[in-house]
């Protein structure tokens, strides 16, 4: 690819990037990025937990909604904590 490359085409990185995935399966691996951003997902998960708990203050009269909000917040918290514990343990 030379100087006449369209603005939408990307040139693969020329550095020796070590990837553990096949670029045929994950095309973005050829440019040096592949995988999940676990830190961003953890932050987003905790933000969702806080938002769910903030929704407890509302104008509803029954407490069925509160049970669902606390339940979903607890479920997400358990999933996030479990992920952190499993990440620290050697396999």
Image (cartoon, grey):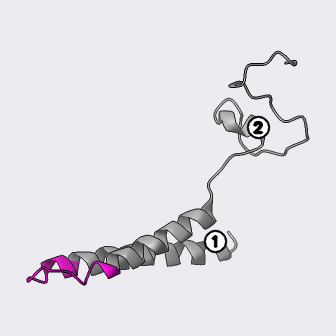
Residue 86: x and y, percent?
A: 59, 73
Circle 2 packing at 10 Å, graded few (<14), some (14-19), many (20+), is some
* Quadrant hosting residue 79: bottom left
Quadrant (top left, top right, bottom left, bottom right) of the C terminus: bottom right
Q: Disc 2 marks which residue?
A: 31
Q: Which residues are magenta?
A: 54-67
Q: Is residue 27 left or right of residue 69?
A: right
Task: Please state which of the two labelled residues, at mark 2 or mark 1, is closer to the viewer.
Answer: 2
**What residue sits 13% from the left and 83% below the top?**
63
The verdict on residue 18 being magenta is no
Residue at the spot of label 1: 87
Residue 87: x percent and y percent?
63, 71
Left or right for 27, reference 75: right
Residue at 48% from the left image edge and 75% from the top image edge: 46
Q: Quadrant of residue 37?
A: bottom right
Q: CA distance from mark 2 to mark 1?
A: 26 Å
Judged left or right of residue 64, residue 72 is: right
């Amino acid at each position: 690819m030379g100087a006449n490359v369209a603005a939408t085409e990307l040139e693969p990185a020329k550095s020796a990037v070590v990837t553990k995935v096949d670029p045929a399966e994950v095309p973005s691996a050829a440019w040096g990025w592949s995988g999940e951003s676990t830190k961003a997902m953890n932050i987003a998960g905790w933000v969702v937990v806080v938002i769910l708990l903030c929704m407890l203050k509302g104008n509803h009269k029954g407490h069925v909604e509160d049970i669902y909000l606390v339940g979903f917040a607890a479920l997400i918290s358990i999933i996030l904590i479990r992920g952190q514990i499993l990440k620290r343990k050697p396999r």
